[in-house]
């Protein structure tokens, strides 16, 4: 598990890096209210919020108090493992926008610890299964080339 102080420090570092290079960020943005983490067209997060993107490039503005939840800490760790620390862009979380909306809904309502662990397990499982799928896809393309 990651220390909460370390997580807040990492989030601040990511936001500083993103703020420095904010003008280069050109991901699609939509206007749709999604509860606590809503999409926004503004390039700067509101006071008391931070911005993350999902794997399908949807932008979410999330309250800083959500950094206290275990699920966001784990998502940041998974993000760092999968995408690395962003030096030239936004923080991208390893889940799609539908899953992110569900996470925000649960965190807003005060999710139970066992449900948090189940959600994290499903994210980790989807990550590993997608990497296995891409490895199989690469093997199949190599076999096609060899058999040609």
Image: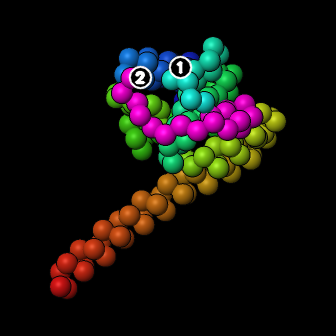
Name the quadrant containing residue 8: top right
- From the viewer's perspective, is residue 126 above or below residue 42? below
Magenta stretch encompasses residue 34: yes
Instruction: Specify start and end residues of the magenta stretch as a single range.
Output: 22-39
- Mark 2 residue element: helix
Q: Label for residue 44?
A: 1
Q: Nearer the viewer, residue 125 or 130?
A: 130
Residue 132 horizontal/vertical position (percent): 42, 64
Q: Quadrant of the N terminus?
A: top right
Residue 74 appears in view? no
Residue 94 horizontal/vertical position (percent): 51, 45
Judged left or right of residue 36, residue 127 is left
Judged left or right of residue 94, residue 60 is right
Magenta stretch encompasses residue 26: yes
Q: Residues within 10 Å of mark 2 (few under 14, many from 20)?
A: some
Name the residue that disc number 2 marks. 22
Q: Quadrant of the C terminus?
A: bottom left
Residue 40 horizontal/vertical position (percent): 60, 30
- Cβ atoms under marks 1 and 2 closer than 8 Å: yes
- From the viewer's perspective, is residue 106 above or below residue 41? below
- Mark 1 residue element: loop
Q: Nearer the viewer, residue 22 or 84?
A: 22
């Amino acid at each position: 598990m990651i220390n909460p102080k370390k997580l807040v420090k990492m989030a601040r570092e990511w936001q500083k890096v993103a703020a420095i290079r904010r003008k280069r960020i050109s991901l699609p943005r939509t206007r749709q209210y999604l509860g606590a983490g809503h999409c926004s067209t503004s390039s700067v997060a509101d006071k008391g919020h931070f911005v993350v993107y999902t794997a399908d490039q949807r932008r979410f503005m999330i309250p800083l108090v959500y950094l206290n939840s275990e699920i966001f800490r784990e998502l940041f760790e998974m993000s760092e493992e999968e995408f690395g620390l962003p030096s030239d862009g936004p923080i991208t979380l390893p889940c799609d926008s539908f899953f992110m909306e569900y996470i925000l809904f649960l965190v807003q309502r005060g999710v139970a610890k066992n449900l948090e662990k189940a959600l994290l397990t499903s994210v980790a499982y989807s990550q590993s299964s997608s990497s296995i799928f891409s490895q199989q896809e690469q093997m199949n393309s190599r076999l096609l080339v060899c058999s040609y």
